[in-house]
Amino acid sequence: MKKILHRIDQVNTWIGQLFGWCALILTLFVTYEVFSRYAFRSPHAWAFDVMNMLYGALFMMAGAYTLGKNGHVRGDVLYGFFPPRLQALLDLILYILFFFPGVIALVWAGYAYASESFAINEHSTITADGPPIYPFKAIIPIAGFALILQGIVEVVRCVQCLRDGDWPSRDIDVEEVDVDKLKDMVNVTDADIQEVDQYIATQGDKA
């Protein structure tokens, strides 16, 4: 069981990293389109649709990855002060009451939405000759299914925390820069920073 849950974590991490490349592709594509529009006077009518689909794919497929890394925005004004067991209990209740019903509805509706799009060979109507959008709509139920699997992993983490009194560890992928950790790594204290600031200010006054 533990291996299966760990494998789900790994798969969703891989998916998140894979679709993370959409950010680079989107940046390069927008740069090319702007250059083509203003330098060559040759804009592409389908560019807007492609940009939307790239961003939408990145947004949807990163959901399970972000959940697995505990990276979603949380209104934790009080939550952060609670002991781990109470946090786990609240999370478990919210997963059961809101998360799973909502995501299951997303998968159900998304599957019907994508199936209809494939059946009619749907293309974008924003432009006269819009690109096909049924592959993009197929991402909706896939992203929802990945969220369900990751949600099961998170429920197990909640149960482990209720049992052990502390949150189990997570796989570390990419973290934002922690200033305090960075200071410890380079052996710099607040006093050292203040001393450098004063030196720079002194040199500025002399100049």
Image (cartoon, helix red, strand yellow):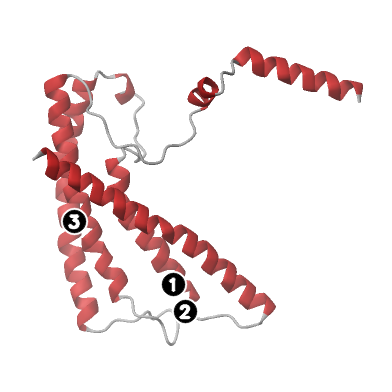
Say left or right for 175 vs 65.
Answer: right
Which type of secondary structure does the marked residue at label 2 adopt? loop
Marker disc for residue 46: 2
Say left or right for 80 vs 95.
Answer: right
Q: Which amino acid, mark 2?
A: Trp
Q: Which amino acid, mark 3?
A: Phe
> Taking the image as drawn, is residue 76 in sight?
yes
Which type of secondary structure does the marked residue at label 3 adopt? helix
Callout 2 touching callout 3 (CB < 8 Å): no
Residue ID at (18%, 59%): 107
Give coordinates of residue 156: x percent, y percent. Answer: 13, 35
Callout 1 touching callout 3 (CB < 8 Å): no
Packing grade of label 2 (10 A; few <14, some 14-19, many >=20) is some
Say left or right for 191 vs 94.
Answer: right
Marker disc for residue 145: 3
Q: Could you tell which of marks 1 and 3 lies nearer the N-terminus?
A: 1
Marker disc for residue 50: 1
What separation in Å lies between label 1 and label 3 (alpha carbons)? 24 Å
> Taking the image as drawn, is residue 98 in sight?
no
Callout 1 touching callout 2 (CB < 8 Å): yes
What separation in Å lies between label 2 and label 3 (alpha carbons)? 29 Å
Q: Which amino acid, mark 1?
A: Val
